[in-house]
Image (spheres, helix red, strand yellow):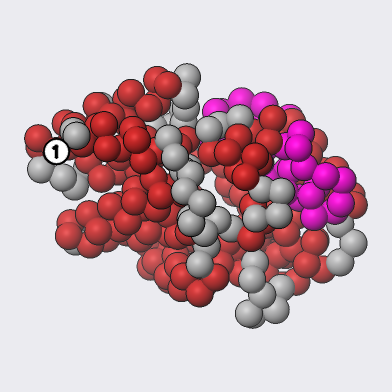
Amino acid sequence: MSLSEQQRSRASQTPASAHLPEQHTARTGQVWLLRSRGCWAAAAALIGDSPEAAVERAELLIEAAFFTGADWDDAEGALRAAEAVVRDNRGRAAAACARGFLAYAATVLKVHDRLDEAQAALGRASAMLPPEDPARPLLDFRRGLIAHGLLGDGNAARTAYRRAHAGAEQQQDTHLLSYTWRYLGAIAQEDGNLAGARHGYAESLRLREETGFAIGVAPALAALAEVSPTAEATQLRAEARRLSRAFAGTPIWLTLD
């Protein structure tokens, strides 16, 4: 079986043994399956009416806007609805963390400059969460994104990503780990540590394939291609192009040239 065939097979499966984040384990397979294939609106329609569900719905639609570059108003509306119904500090922190990511996404994709809003929202979330709260790893990761992608502060980003990675490992959150490995790989690549970058990117790809996060496989392939020998890089980019075309050019920010 060729490299592309192996990746195509793994990306199309969601093994029952894969550990998905806690929010996916209750309803779960159907919401995760839709989300992992880029059907965010359909996934959001399956979510209930509790305050926690409102935040989860907002997170799905924010992710959709980030991957597609469209429907920002839907994401904003879902987030405002969640902010209106959360009742305790943990819910408020979750909504603030979501707002920080929405503002980051809009800024990094050059839709609107919302850097100040992103920093303030994640700061509010941090102030409301105890140090060992299970929501900390995601918050740390998003603070790393802002330091890395918007402020150009590699040291602060590295620290935040490492905290997020350690927390995700402790919680066995393989989806978040697929992101922390990806960005720790990026930091390693920027430091000139190509072996460390290759390891991080390969782990990110492995976890996305194992959990069936199909919509995230193409960018993982493209990242690994950046630090791979020429022949392998050509194969990886070709498979990334195929997957991106299969998902109608999603994610829009993926560069394969």
Quadrant the C terminus occupies: top left
Residue appearing at x 86%, y 66% in the figure: 88
Q: Which residue is drawn at 53% across and 39% down?
A: 36
Q: Up-down: is 100 above or below 75?
A: below
Q: Residue 256: give x, y in percent of width and height.
A: 29, 29
Q: Would residue 65 be counted in the magenta stretch? A: yes
Compared to residue 222, the image places residue 28 above or below, namely below
Looking at the rendered structure, the kind of residue marked 1 is: Glu
Classify residue 34 as left or right of residue 228: right
Q: Is residue 86 visible in this depiction of the protein?
A: yes
Residue 43 magenta: no
Asked if residue 151 shows in the view, the reply is no
Q: What stretch is highlighted in magenta?
A: 44-73
Residue underneath mark 1: 232
Place of residue 229 in the rendered image (x, y in percent of width and height, measured from the top left): 10, 43
- Name the residue rendered at 37%, 58% in the picture: 181
Q: Is the magenta stretch mostly helix, strand or loop?
A: helix
